[in-house]
Amino acid sequence: QRFLRGSTDLAPMANVSDARDMEIPMAAGETAAEHPEEGNVMKELLDRPYINKHTGLDFLVMCFMGSVLGLLSIPYCAGVEDLPKFWLRHFGPAGFVEENLELSSQIFFRRGGASWILICWGFCTAVGVLKVLVKLDKFPSFIDELKHQHVDPLVNLKVVICCIASLSAGAVMGLEAGLGSVGAALGFLLWKLAEKILPSTSDTLSDQRRRIYILAGLAGAFGTIFPAPVVSVILVSEIATAGTERSVAEEEFMTGRRLPKKVFFYLVPVAVSAFVVTYAVNYAITKSHKIPPPLYDRGYDNLSVFTGVGLGAIAAVAVVIFLLIGALMKAIFSLVGSPLERRLGTPTRQIVTASLAGLITGVAIYLFPLACGSGKDGMMPTRALSHADKITVLELFGLALAKVVAYWACAHGGLVGGIFYPLLYFGLTLGEICAKVFHIDYLVAEPVMIGATPGALLPAPITALAFPVCMFVTGPTQTVPILTAIVIANAILVGSGFLEKMMSKKP
């Protein structure tokens, strides 16, 4: 399989969007054997050999890159998770952090510290000032980098700095964005080094190598925070090839593209190395393994497939609401930001919108304290509260709404972070609501909604399945309702064309 060549030059930010639109995602098309040998069916199934003289060096570099990312993720995650906890603890209710956020239902609403509003507003305003100082306004997301394998290390450095500042200030966004920028930039720089040590024999092969290194860096970065490295590998594989069906005729049956084995071969060692190093260092620090109790020994309910159908439909509706709130927040921030930019310039717009995002976030976490953070640390406390009936359905609705409003305020206010963990947390709260309202087993509703909510929106259905499977350590039969819900939710929104029409409408 051949890769189509993309530019390796670091284009100015003004031209990055155009460059990406022209650049074809790195994925191998599926083609039939040109001259199949009669009676040799197995040979037709084989991929082309992919081991060459560069493989040994590249493999060692991948293991090194994964190990470095594993080490870097420890202070990164500690910083973006512990810094907000510091001011939440000192300016919030007694025992808020020490007691693992376990607040009784009687005092759950408006349980946050009033000073959180001022602190979050002030810190996020400072993030706006920081973005002006480092000259970061528009920047690529990790989805862009996965799709197009184009990286500007200087821009990625700015993204990492602003992501750490945003999350430390209390932004309700995912920590995966900063790590993804680190991984992609590290992959690009190590590609430069590998090319100097053992150059590729042509520009096309050099470009292939660059793309592989960038994808591997992203896989390694996500391997440090996901439940298992397989989730990271699947996510990179699915997102990098998403949307490629549009490049062929609708009548074609075997459409789309896939990553060739020569790419997959490198994603695994970097993701595994990153996970192993992170796991080992965390154990050395905490002396404990954070492994949830497995669910694979639970019995299989043959009617759970119908539960998956119903929950999938609910997930689709919930994602539409999620996106509508995002459109509303975008309109609000445009009404504020556009006139400011016309009259006072881009820096003023950046500072004011970041400040407004901080104010909205501060109010949201004051009203519903569990809405704070990316959602990664809030999942277990939320489950514990719900299972113990210490939080009502109405409070769960409010918590979900606060999380979504705060996320979109941060996203449209220019703060830096990811969508993945906030979306997963939104799915968890939906699972708790469905379990209480429809009297479904928590250990069915939770993994189903955690999978179906991102699965309804993101072009990564197997990733959406792998995340709850690895998180809850489920058995094979317990994937029946999860996979069913993911397919139903995605079919309702994406398969029907509803989501495309909704996103095509001009405000």
Image (tube, rainbow, N blue to C red):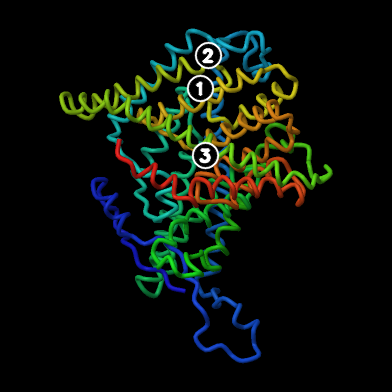
Crowd tier of the residue under label 2, counting other residues whose Cα lies within 10 Å: few below 14, some 14–19, many 20 or above: many
- Give the mark count: 3
Q: Amino acid at mark 1?
A: Ala
> What residue did someone put label 3 on?
420
Is residue 195 visible in the rendered structure shown here? yes
Residue at numbered disc 2:
367
Question: Whole-Å distance between the Cαs marked 2 and 3?
Answer: 23 Å
Judged from the image, the secondary structure of the residue bearing numbered disc 2 is helix
Q: How far apart, in angstroms, are the residues tagged by discs 3 and 1?
A: 17 Å
Q: Identify the residue under disc 1.
A: 402
Visible in this render: residue 276? Answer: no
At label 3, counting other C-alpha atoms closer than 10 Å, the crowd grade (few under 14, some 14-19, many 20 or more) is some
| Nearest the eye: 95 or 213 | 95
Which x, y percent locates residue 474?
A: 75, 45
Query: Identity of the amino acid at label 2?
Result: Leu
Residue 44, quarter of the rendered image: bottom right
